[in-house]
Amino acid sequence: MKFMIVDDSAFSVMMIRDILEQNGYNVVATAGNKEEMLHVFKETTPDLVTMDLTMPDIDGLESVTASIATEFGEATLNVGFAGSGR
Amino acid sequence: MEVKYINPFLLAFTNIMPQLGFVNVEKKNIGLASTVQSRGIVINVGLVGNIRGNVIYSMPIASGRQIAKVMMMGMDVPEFDEMAQSAISELSNMLTAHAATDFSNSGLEVNISTPTMMFGDNITVHIDMPQSLKVDFEADGLPVSIYVAVRSVAKK
């Protein structure tokens, strides 16, 4: 299964990547903002995306899923959301 | 500032730090403070909603490096580099978000800003809110100060 990690925190990306890779998963891409997210999603076609809920240029579950769905269609949208302490 | 508005921030520190791997988390001092004087790291997180204001975290660079090391599972942190900065910034986010959740459980809606971090040899921050509180903690002997400058806003 191919994973993509979207988070503007370098620390969070590192920790999520470590956890996934230590459990045998393949992290094919990371992104730190909306533009990068849409670009690398298209490039790497991950099976599952872990998504920070609050980033400077994109915020909230609906806007994130809407961005991906608008860009790539709603056929196979698997997104996990993460937010420290919330 | 009413005591009930500071407790969520104290609870956040004493709950979150052990989850990160710190064994001894102690509150050392609490008192009024209108100025942050730091020779190290200062992080400001804003709050909006039924509780408004700022919470400011301050610590020496050495504390920041050691806390980042614990957060990164013991990885060596010889300098307060970009990854260490990101870890400490995330810590302030986790602590403030924990407090915001606590407020939310009490029926007070609070949103927090992304953290703003500064670090340097001689940083002064003036807090323009009466009766702001400074709480000094130690996590396994590493000093961290939390300045709470918030006020409540009546729910509409």
Image: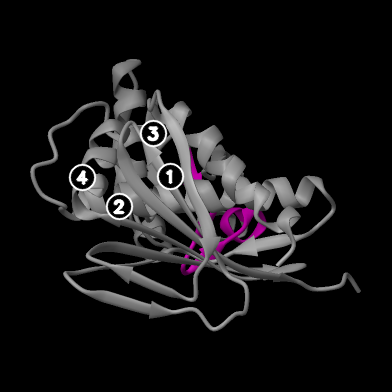
Which amino acid type corresponds to the residue marked 2 in the rendered image?
A: Ser
Residue range (magenta):
A49-65
Could you tell which of marks 4 and 1 lies nearer the N-terminus?
A: 4
Which amino acid type corresponds to the residue marked 3 in the rendered image?
A: Phe
The residue tagged 3 is A3
Q: CA distance from mark 2 to mark 4?
A: 11 Å
- Sort mark 2 into few (<14), some (14-19) or many (20+) by Cα contacts within 10 Å: some
**Which one is nearer the viewer's eye here, B111 or A10?**
B111
The residue tagged 2 is B86
Chain identity of mark 3:
A
- Sort mark 3 into few (<14), some (14-19) or many (20+) by Cα contacts within 10 Å: many
Could you tell which of marks 1 and 2 lies nearer the N-terminus?
A: 2
When the figure is inspected, residue B136 is found, relative to residue B155, above or below; the finding is: above
Position of residue A19 in the picture relative to residue B74 (left or right)? right
Could you tell which of marks 2 and 4 lies nearer the N-terminus?
A: 4
Residues tagged 2 and 4 counted as in contact (Cβ below 8 A): no
The residue tagged 1 is B137
Position of residue A45 in the picture relative to residue B76 (left or right)? right
**Which one is nearer the viewer's eye here, B149 or B90?**
B149
Please state which of the two labelled residues, at mark 2 or mark 4, is closer to the viewer.
Answer: 4
The residue tagged 4 is B65
Residue A9 seen by the camera: no
Q: CA distance from mark 4 to mark 1?
A: 16 Å
- The verdict on a common chain for dots 4 and 1 is yes
Q: Residue furthest top?
A: A23
- The verdict on a common chain for dots 3 and 2 is no
Chain identity of mark 4:
B
- Which residue is rendered at x = 21% and y = 74% of the image? B122
User: Residue B50 appears at what percent x and percent y?
Assistant: 77, 67
Please state which of the two labelled residues, at mark 1 or mark 2, is closer to the viewer.
Answer: 1
Position of residue A34 in the picture relative to residue B88 (left or right)? right
Q: CA distance from mark 3 to mark 1?
A: 39 Å
